[in-house]
Image: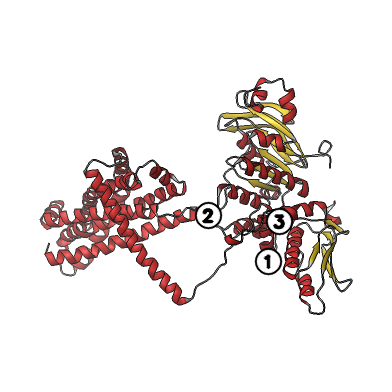
Amino acid sequence: MHPSARLEPKVEVSRPTADRVRVCLAGDWRRAGVPSLADVETLLRRDDGRPRVIEFDTRELRAWDSGVLAFAARCEELGKEHGVEVRLGTLPEGLQRLLRLARAVPEAREARRGSRRPGLVARVGEAAQATGGFVLDFAAFLGESLQSLGRLVRGRSAMRWGDALHVMQTTGPQALGIVALINFLVGLILAFVGAVQLARFGATMYVADLVAVATVREMGCLMTGIILCGRTGAAFAAQLGTMRVNEEVDALATFGFPPVDFLVLPRLLGLGLMMPLLCVFADLIAIGGGFVVATGLLDLSSADYVQRTLAAITLESFLLGVFKGGVFGLLVALVGCWRGLRCGNTAAAVGQATTSAVVIGITGIIAADGVFAVVTKVLEI
Amino acid sequence: MDPATAPSKIEIRSLTMAYGDFVVMRDIDVRIRAGEVFVIMGGSGCGKSTLLKHMIGLKAPAAGGVYYDGQSYWDADEAGRLALRRRLGVMFQQGALWSSLTLAENVALPLEAFSGLGPADIRELARVKLALVGLRGFEEYLPAEISGGMRKRAALARALALDPEILLFDEPSAGLDPVSARRLDDLLLELRDSLGATLVVVSHELASIFAIADHAIFLDPETRRVRAEGNPRDLMRGSEDPRVREFLTRGSG
C-alpha cells in the first residue's frame, strides 16, 4: 500500500437495535494508537435497557496493529464486567488468534499489585522504623565481621591471604598519587591561610608549627580518610553489590564459605593496615607543601622550618593521627562492604549502595573525628 | 503470502565480520524473505550472535553490508539507521530488561519515545503485549522479582512493543525447560502468522530449530564461512556434509 493512499483510521459505535452495540472499525489503524473506548462504555452504562451483544464490523478495516488488539481485548473485558456477550467472530483471523493467545494464560490475580501511598503519620513511622533497623543492621554486620576476625585469629578462617594482599596493593600503593596531590595542596592552603593570620602578629615563623600540628593531628588522616572513602569505599560497595546481583555471594554461601570471611575480612585488613601508612605519607607530603610556601614566599629558611616542625610534633599527636587513620580505614571498609552486601538485585541498587557507602562513610569519618576531639581533650593528649 | 515467492526482506551481502584483525566469518551471503522464520545455527562461539549484532546495528561489518528492503543499513546516515532500527524488535539472550523499571514500564518506554501516543493508550498497549506473552497481572513487577522464563517472555513483549516488521532473537529458548521452550516456539510462530512479521532466530537448540525454521544457515567456525543453507529438515536428511549432519543429529548420524 502506498503511504499517500493511507486511509484515515475511524471507529464508529452505533446501536442498530436496542440490544446490540455495533463497533465499526475502518481505515488503516497501523501506528494510530488504540481506538477510543469511550462510546462503547457510555452505551454500556446507559440505563434505558442495557444491550446484550457487542459486535464488530471490520469490513472497511484495511490494516491493524496491536492498538486494535488492545481495543478488542478491552471490549472483551468490558463485556465480561457488564454481562454483555462480545462477538469476536467478525474480527480479522489473525486478530482473533492473538486475542485467544492473550486470554490463554489467566491473569495472575494474586500477583496483581496496587500502588498505594500511605499517609504522613504512617510514612514517618515507617521511616523511623527503617532508621532503627538500619542501625541495628550495621551492628549485626559489625558483629559478623568481628566473629570473622575471631575465626582468623584462631586460624579457622576461609579468608585467602592473597585477596588481602591484592586489596592492600589497590588501596595502598595505587592511591599514593591522589593522596599526595590532595595533601600537598592542603599543606599549601594551611600555610597560606596561617601566614596571613600570623603576619598580623609578626609571627610568620610559627607557620611551620601550625602546618605540622594541624596536619599530623587532624588534616592528614581526615583528608586521607575522605579520599579513600570516595575511592575505595565506593569501589568496595560497587564490587560486592555487583557480586550480589550476579548471585556470586549466594554461590560462596552454598559452598560453605562465609561471605564475610571471603569478601569483607580481606578488605578490612587491607584498608586497616594501609590507612595508617598512607597517613604517615600524607603527613610528610602536607608538611612538604607547607615547606614550599614558607621557604618560597615567607622568607623562612629551610633549616628553621625543619627545626620548628620537628619541635612542634610530639609523639602523642603523631601516633594519635596515625591511630585515627587506622580507625577511619576500618570504618570506610566496613561501611563499603556493608552497603555492598546489602545491595538489592538491580543495576540501580548497585548505584544506591555505592552512593550510600560514600555518604555514610564520610559522615562516619567526620563524626568519629569529633568523638576523638572530645576524648583527646578530656585525656589531655 | 507464499514465502517461496516473497521478495527478500533482509539481505546480507558478502559480509565479513571481524574483531580487530581476527576474522570471525567471511563472505556471508543470505537472503531472508518476508514472513519467513530464518534460523542462524552453529556450535558455540562460531559467531552466531556476532552476526545478529551486525544485523541490528550494534557492530559494523569489516566488509559487505546488511540491506533491509534493499536499503543498506550501514551506508545510511544516523537518521536513516534510526528509522531502520525502529522497524526491528530485538530480544537479547539474557532478556536485557531494564532492571529498575517494572515490566509495564519496560514495554512502555519505547512506546513513549517513538509512538507519539498518549499515556492511556500506551498503558493499554503495554498491558495487551504482556498478556500476549502470558504475563497478565505482572505489570507492576520488577524484572528481578520474576523467574528466568518469565523474564524471557517479558523481553519478548518488549521486543513487540513497536509492532516491528522484523523480530530478531538471540537464543530465545536457551535456559528454558522443554515445555516452556516449546510454548515460546509456538508463540513465535503464532506471532509470525498473525502479525505477518519476519523472524530471525539465533539458536543451537535442535528441537526448536526443527519446530520453527523455514530456512537456516549453518556457520562453521573452522572454515569461517557459511557451511550449509536450506531447510534444516532437508539438511538433516540430504546434506552431504558430515559436519552439518553431525550437528543436526547430535553426533549420532
Residue at image coords 44%, 48%: A242
| Label 1 environment density (alpha carbons within 10 Å; few <14, some 14–19, many ≥20) | few
Which residue, given by chain and number where applicable, does mark 2 sit on?
A: B145
Q: Are discs 2 and 1 located on one and the same chain?
A: yes
Q: Amino acid at mark 1?
A: Ala
Q: Name the foreground residue: A228 vs B186.
A: B186
Spatial CA span between label 2 and label 1: 25 Å
In percent of width and height, residue B78 lies at: 66, 48
Q: Amino acid at mark 3?
A: Arg
Q: Is residue A312 left or right of residue A232?
A: left
Residue at image coords 29%, 49%: A268
Spatial CA span between label 3 and label 2: 23 Å
Which residue, given by chain and number where applicable, does mark 3 sit on?
A: A103
Q: Tell me which corner region of the image, top left, top right, bottom left or bottom right, holds residue A13.
A: bottom right
Spatial CA span between label 3 and label 1: 21 Å
- In this rendering, is residue B81 above or below A44? above
Which residue, given by chain and number where applicable, does mark 1 sit on?
A: B120
In percent of width and height, residue B152 lies at: 60, 47
Q: How many marks?
A: 3
Per the rendering, the mark at residue A84 is: none
Between marks 3 and 1 in the image, the one whose residue lies nearer the viewer: 3
In percent of width and height, residue A283 lies at: 21, 52
Residue at image coords 74%, 46%: B190
